[in-house]
Amino acid sequence: MNTRCCELARLISLACVGCASLAHAQSPTVVKSPETVPELVELSPFVVQTEPDRGYYSSQTMAGGRLRQEIKDTGSSIQVVTKQFMDDLGVTGVEELFQYTTGTEVGGIMGNYRMDADGSSSTQNTGTITDTNDIESRGFEAEITFNPTRNWRIACNLAKQETILTNIAPALTAQLNNVWLPHLAKYGNLDWNLPAEPVNGSTTAQQVNSPLLDYHVVKGQEGRAQAEQRKWRINLVSRYQVSEGKLKRFSVGGAARWQDRYADGYPLINDPRGVVVPDVLHPYYAEAEWSFDAILGYRLRILGHRDWRAQLNVRNLQNWTSDTVSVIRRQPDGTIARVRFDPPLQILLTNTFTF
């Protein structure tokens, strides 16, 4: 009995081994397909980037604190100017850069501020009148960056500014109402130098009114936005880098700047109190200003891995002959009192080598 059981177990073991061998012999052979070769991608010969091209846009700043942080998390109005923005405009100093930023003006012959030829910027003769006032400034700034394609960059910023003066010259106002105006009501028609003699020159009223014109200009705008301030400014900068064809190493662009009008003078009217005051409700306005720039660039690899970039910037195309003047001050009758030379045409050629 034991012998038969042993033989039966041996036959079962041999059958299992045979089935396993047969199953192994009949299993299908998996043939691996050849690996697919990825398509070659040709990158820019100048810049290899791992992040999307944002053009003139920057979302972070260190101006709001000691550490780098998001602009949206800062508690103040900040405009970030990137290196690419400055390179495209060919700026070499803050005087050139501030003409393209919001809320800034630049003095001097190359600037956008309405400065006199002698360097002064007063629009009225203040004389020796000094006093205090409260200032309230309101504004709005917006900056838009847009990249229609990888090679095309556009930046636009606009700003609105209003300055409101209140509580203007309280001490001087009290002196006028309590002393000067009652005095002028009685003796304003007398001669300034010899009040007991017939009038042979300026009257007392004329002599007092002259240094007070600026006071009346400012006082008349109390609680209202100052008409002598440009309310709106708009700047637009664009640049396109050619990446194909015979012109693939060239870039072309331009910039446009617009400044709103401002009051450059006031007519005079007779006040019921017996004084002559400027009509601040109907000022004379200087025209709004446009400025245009052009950009042409060329880039090439030289001496192995050296990057050479040449750029031509032409500024103030609207003043091609460099002889345009603008009115900055008018007489009470509307005739021209002061003018300034507009920023002349500038042609700048820069060469940059990157090592």
Image: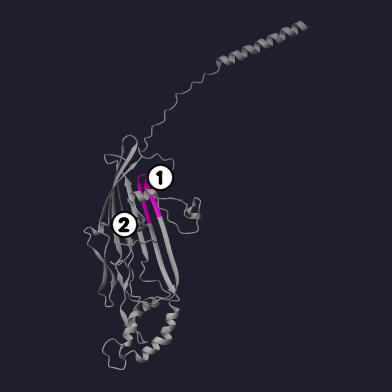
Residue type at mark 2 is: Ala
Q: CA distance from mark 1 to mark 2?
A: 23 Å
Q: Is residue 107 left or right of residue 335?
A: right
Give the vertical position of 53 relative to 344 (above or below). above
Determine the main secondary structure of the stretch shown in magenta: strand
| Rendered-image quadrant of the N terminus | top right
Residue range highlighted in magenta? 144-156
Name the spot of residue 19 as percent of width and height, x first.
62, 14
Residue that appears at 29% across and 67% down: 118
Return the residue found at the far front. Answer: 193
Which of the 4 image quadrants contains residue 138? bottom left
Between residue 57 and residue 186, name the one nearer to us. Answer: 186
* Few, some or many residues within 10 Å of mark 1 (<14, 14–19, 20+): few
15, above or below 317, in the image: above
Pointer 2: what residue?
A: 256
Camera-side residue of 144 and 183? 183
Give residue 66's position: percent from left, percent from top.
Answer: 50, 52
Q: Which residue in the protein does label 1 denote?
A: 53
Say what secondary structure mark 2 lies in: strand
Residue 301 got which mark? none
N-terminal of the two: label 1 or label 2?
1
